[in-house]
Image: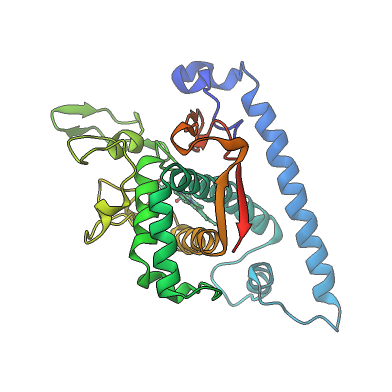
Amino acid sequence: MEEAGRPNLGDFFPVLGKLDLQGIQRRNKGHVGKVLDLFGWVIAQRLRKMKSESYVSTNDMLDTLLTIGDDNNREAQMNPTGIKHLFLDLFVAGTDTTASSLEWAMAELLRNPDKLVKAKNELDEMIGKGNHLAESDIPQLPYLRAILKETFRLHPALPLLLPRKAGADVEINGFTVPKGARVLLNLWAIGRDPAIWDDPTSFVPERFLGSDVDAKGNYFELVTFGAGRRICPGMPLALRMLHMMLGSLIHWFDWKLSDGVEPEKLDMEEKFGIALQKAKPLLAIPTPI
Ligand code: HEM
């Protein structure tokens, strides 16, 4: 992901694109090749196991896709090469985005201990100390949901979404976007626009309490996962995972920053790249409750 997000001269001067002067495409091919080899190995192992008579299906995603591949009556066919590339897509799109959103949420809570206490109290009240958080609890946890929305607003995992290309000349607000132009949507700036948000640089989950705004593509001020027919297909999984992981981290541990860092001094600098990551990884110490 880091390599793919490096500023590439070819993006600014398309005529230089094919020359790959910085070697970005060459290095990316190498990284992608390694990941594809790894998935290829996993698929080959599974196919070998599936041939054995004693094999009991796990019904996981790989088993399901391989079974679809065997079914000639289906319209959509999946062969191991297709599965390998599908896994690459999901792996690239789903790991850094989810991990960095969780890291930013934890960093904001450690920088704002009063919000952390509020989230902990909500979990204690709704789930009860010592009880595990379940997916079905998420609708009963408005403050936890508000924390994630506020994290998406300030720290969108893909701050410029994914690049688009105008299919035709389009006029928007008096500006002409010519056919073929690359269009980037600056979600980071929208999330901090004082014309839309009060006190935009502060972490205030409360702004989402009692508000209908969510990040599922219906409110253009918060399109963390994009919108429309190319909206992130991993959104339902990402939202479930993030609520479950963040809620469990808050519910099961007391947290403090390492090396005695004062909350207000926590470094929140961002690193340049496709995915918005913390420049300095968050160092925090959990104590089981
Ligand atoms: C916090 C977590 C995530 C965020 C913020 C996020 C955000 C996005 C965004 C903004 C897009 C581009 C949408 C557009 O073009 O308008 C996208 C595309 C995509 N995401 Fe996610 N995503 C996340 C997690 C995941 C997960 C967990 C998966 C899969 C396991 C996933 C799979 C994909 C794929 C395959 C695409 C490309 C879809 C296409 O080209 O049509 N994402 N995501």
Screen quadrant of the C terminus: bottom right
Whole-percent x, y for residue 250 in the image:
51, 59
Q: Residue 123 at x, y = what percent?
A: 44, 68
108 to the left or right of 207: right
Image quadrant in which you'd find residue 288: bottom right
Q: Does residue 231 show up?
A: no
Give the image quarter of residue 281: top right
Q: State the residue at coordinates (14%, 32%).
A: 173
Q: In this view of the protein, can residue 47 be seen by the observer?
A: yes
Q: Nearer the viewer, residue 218 or 107?
A: 107
Q: Is residue 243 above or below residue 227?
A: below
- Furthest residue toward left: 174
Q: Position of residue 186 (x, y in %)?
A: 33, 34
201 versus 70 height, above or below: above
Residue sitting at 18 percent across and 27 percent down? 175
Question: Which residue is found at the position 52% from the left and 61% from the top?
Answer: 241
How is colour applied across the structure in the image?
A: rainbow
34 vs 241, left or right, is right
Foreground residue, 53 or 76?
Answer: 53
Q: Nearer the viewer, residue 54 or 75?
A: 54
Residue 218, located in which quarter of the rendered image?
bottom left
The x and y percentages for residue 286 are 61, 53
Up the image or down, 239 lies above or below 196; here it is below
The quarter in which the N terminus is drawn is: top right
Q: How many marks?
A: 0
